[in-house]
Amino acid sequence: VRKAGGDNILSLSEADHKKLNRKSIIEKRLLTALDQHHLKVLYQPQADLKTGKIDAVEALVRWDDKEIGVVSPDELIPIAEETGLINQIGSFIIEEACRQAVAWQQQGIEMKVGINLSVREFRDKNMAKFILETLMKTGCPAHLIQIEITEKFALEAEAETSIIQQMRTLEEEGITFVLDDFGTGYASFRYMQLLPIQTLKIDQMYIRSLTQSEKTQRLINGIVHFGKSMNLTVIAEGVETEEQKQLLKQYGCDAIQGFFISKPVTAEKIPQLISS
Ligand code: C2E
Ligand code: CA
Ligand code: CA
Ligand code: CA
């Protein structure tokens, strides 16, 4: 990876310097955080629109560092990818998610857990193996794990047969794949044929303008119908209002995720949310 301005550091603006500086601080602190197990996972529930039941959650990484404060995933993940530390974050999340799915199952709660994985993480030739080993080690059934990949991932994976191979291996074992941030710019119908995807997750950007724009309404309606005709589960993220929920239900969307159901919460809060 070519670092911005790496060979010409004197011409960097002050803002660039600040950015580089923050990045190297985050890098350093992240190493410590991983060592000392300071990363946490929150879970955001998804509700089935037919039954109204919460039957899945998405695992989202959280990091509140005692020196630099909260580092959001949107800042953390790209830096972790550049430095290679993403692999350690990924291993941690995968293990946590599997353990948690088993813990809920032991409480009588059948809950699918979604894990976000980047294309960088799937370039690790041992990714599928690691996931399958973690399922074994934790006793987690494969059908409880959903892997969320983005459209950008799909675009890059298309040219990398080893990634597709790993996805197929996991699919054969019963893991499902979600195409996340659907509609944000890289979508190609080719992926639907090439990659073992079972779920489309409509990006929250569209949901935000849903009740204001008739155009967006037609678009979302179209996406839901497209997904259903492809035999995919369709889920909408970033749902914040009753009005948005009602429209999505009307279009035949399968499930929703967003502040309207719940913000991301700690694992212990999930059983309460289900029974309320
Ligand atoms: P994402 O996968 O699209 O996750 C959804 C994001 O939307 C989350 O932000 C979530 O907290 C937020 N969100 C959920 N419901 C609502 C809502 O109703 N309104 C609004 N305004 N926002 C909502 P978060 O947790 O900050 O994560 C940001 C992104 O970072 C994620 O986007 C995902 O791409 C990435 N990410 C998070 N955790 C991980 C991880 O463990 N590994 C990897 N590779 N990426 C992760
Ligand atoms: Ca996601
Ligand atoms: Ca998303
Ligand atoms: Ca996103």
Image (cartoon, rainbow, N blue to C red):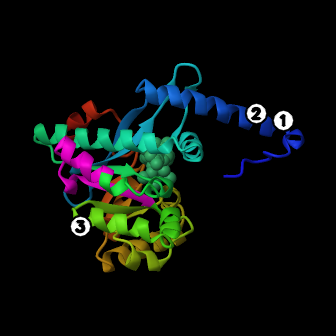
Nearest to viewer (mark 1 / mark 3): 3
Q: Is residue 40 left or right of residue 175?
A: right
Marking on residue 172: 3
Q: Is residue 139 magenta?
A: yes
Marking on residue 104: none
Q: At label 1, which amino acid type do we have?
A: Glu
Segment tinted magenta in the rendering: 130-149
Against 56, is 158 above or below?
below
Report the predominant secondary structure element of the magenta stretch.
helix
Spatial distance from mark 2 to mark 1, Cα to Cα? 6 Å
104 or 259, nearer to the observer: 104
Residue ID at (58%, 46%): 78
Marking on residue 18: 2
Q: Quadrant of residue 98 in the image?
A: top left
Mark 1 neighbour class, 10 Å CA radius: few under 14, some 14 to 19, many 20 or more: few
101 or 244, nearer to the observer: 101
Against 75, is 33 above or below?
above
Residue ID at (59%, 33%): 27
Residue ID at (43%, 57%): 122
Is residue 210 visible in this depiction of the protein? yes
Q: Label 1, secondary structure: give it.
A: helix
Residue under label 1, please give it. 14
Q: Earlier in the sequence, mark 1 or mark 3?
A: 1
